[in-house]
Amino acid sequence: MSSVLLPSVAGMFYPEQADELRQQVDSLLAESPVPDEPPPKALIAPHAGYIYSGPVAASAYRRLLPAADSIERVVILAPSHRVPFRGLATTSADYLRTPLGDIPVDRNAVDQALALPQVEEFDRAFEGEHALEVQLPFLQRSLNNFSIVPFIVGQANALEVGEVLDLLWGGQETLIVISSDLSHFLDYYTAREKDLHTTQAIESLQPDAIGFDDA
């Protein structure tokens, strides 16, 4: 019998009613600028409530619309906010549910990842966790038919996370999504300066230049 991971933050971080949620996400996507670049292989999107981060998230997901039919699998990694653990956690569920419907979990890809020592099946990491869940409605409105390979990341180093990404990188059919906010609780100008430093470090592949409070 198939198991379903139910939403934890619908009605808090985003609307609980399907029609309202669909309308909000579609409106945010429509208001985002149309990019000139081709769809990305990987993207970083924020995970605050839509009232705060929705426009920025939409600007990332807007880039996927031209690839709506070609992306068939989404590998998504989000940080743990509620449960401390070592490594990366995935789920035993067969589907992830949002008010917009159920997303199938790619169990074959999950099983591949579980062969790595830093990956475990740990459903408790997903309970009440918003960072992964808030990405799902944007994916549902940006892509057509896709499966998901979900991970909550605990205490894991760059090599351990990189090994998972290398394993599941795939081709044009696979999208990588990283859920991450940047700095918190700073004034506007300080945040701009700090976040610019963080984005430059990401673009230049210098993870050691990103501090604990930077992202």
Image (spheres, rainbow, N blue to C red):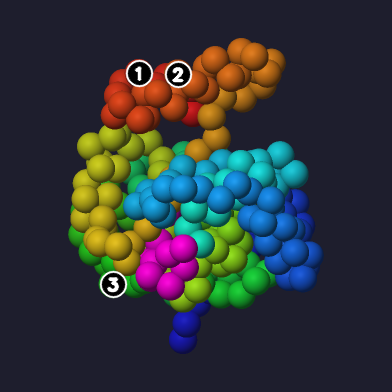
Position of 21 with respect to 41 (left or right) is right
Residue at 32 percent of width and 66 percent of height: 173
Could you tell me which residue is drawn at 75 percent across and 64 percent down?
A: 23
Q: Position of residue 209 (x, y in %)?
A: 35, 18
Where disc 1 sits, the SS reads helix
As for residue 72 lying within the magenta part, the answer is yes
Between 152 and 136, the residue placed more toward the observer is 136
Q: Secondary structure at mark 3?
A: helix
Q: Position of residue 191 (x, y in %)?
A: 60, 19
User: Residue 75, relative to residue 44: is it above or below?
Assistant: below
Q: Which mark is residue 197?
A: 2
> Circle 3 sits on which residue?
108
Eye-nearest disc, 1 or 2: 2
State whether residue 153 is above or below residue 30: above
Residues at discs 1 and 2 in contact (Cβ within 8 Å): yes
Of circles 1 and 3, the one toward us is 1
The amino acid type found where label 3 is placed reads Asn
Mark 2 and mark 3 lie on one chain; the one further toward the N terminus is: 3
Q: SS class of the residue under badge 2? A: helix
Up-down relation of residue 106 to residue 181 (above or below): below
Whole-angstrom CA distance, mark 2 to mark 3, is: 38 Å
Residue 197: % across, % down: 45, 18
Q: Nearer the viewer, mark 2 or mark 3?
A: 2
Amino acid identity at mark 2: His
Magenta segment: 66-78
Picture quarter containing residue 56?
top right
**Which sits earlier in the primary sequence, circle 1 or circle 2?**
2
Using the image, tell me which numbered label, if any, was put on residue 209: 1
Mark 3 and mark 2 in contact (Cβ < 8 Å)?
A: no
What kind of residue is marked 1?
Ala
